[in-house]
Amino acid sequence: MYYLYGAGGHAKVIIEILELAGEQIAAIYDEDVQKNELLHYPVFHHIPHTIAETADPWIISLGSGILRRKAVQTMAVKYGKAFHTSSQISLRTSIGEGTVVMAGAVINSCCDIGRHVIINTKSSVDYDCRLGDYVHISPNA
């Protein structure tokens, strides 16, 4: 089961990636009290201390690298990864925690992808590339 932090458009895509992979969404959290539901999942506004200590993975589902970094700095949780079933990822590539790879993305041999990175829809990261933490590769790039 996964926990998501952020209930915007980026979270919608992550939800579908996790659902396609057969994963369950345990809960979605967002500080915006105007957001109460996302794709039929309830959105909560306060993270109970007991949930923050769970062994289940979290993904920061905020599109902004600055906001992802800020959230990670304040949350001491285990982070997972989400890879769309149609993405192609070399077995010789390392990918950091919290990273999300969208539909149709290709990551070739010997890449080093940082933590909490977004490899967006149909983007390509070629061999030997190094991407730092919180990077966002735009769709079709």
Image (cartoon, rainbow, N blue to C red):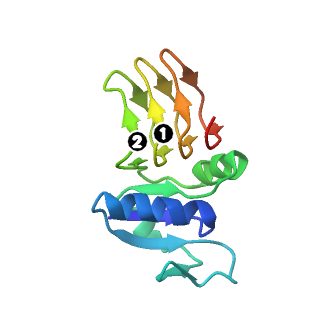
Q: Which mark is residue 25?
A: none
Circle on res. 87: 2
Q: Which residue is mark 1?
A: 105
Q: Secondary structure at mark 1?
A: loop
Quadrant location of residue 18? bottom left
Left or right placement of residue 66 versus residue 119 in this view: right
Residue at (48% x, 23% y) in the render? 112
Mark 2 crowd level (few <14, some 14–19, many ≥20, 10 Å Cα): some
Q: Is residue 141 visible?
A: yes
Q: In the figure, 5 relative to 108: above or below?
A: below
Q: Secondary structure at mark 2?
A: loop
Most extreme residue toward the left is 22
Q: Which residue does the image show at 51% across and 60% down from the upper left? A: 13
**Would residue 80 appear left or right of 32 to someone viewing this image?**
left
Instruction: State the residue at coordinates (65%, 41%).
Output: 138
Q: Can residue 54 be spotted in the picture?
A: no
Q: Quadrant of the N terminus?
A: bottom left
x then y, percent, for residue 32: 69, 76
| Marker count (numbered) | 2
Amino acid type shown at disc 2: Ser
Image quadrant where one finds the C terminus:
top right
Q: Residue furthest top?
A: 128
- Identify whether 140 is placed above or below 111: below
Amino acid at circle 1: Ala
Q: Position of residue 108 (x, y in %)?
A: 43, 23
Res. 3 image quadrant? bottom left
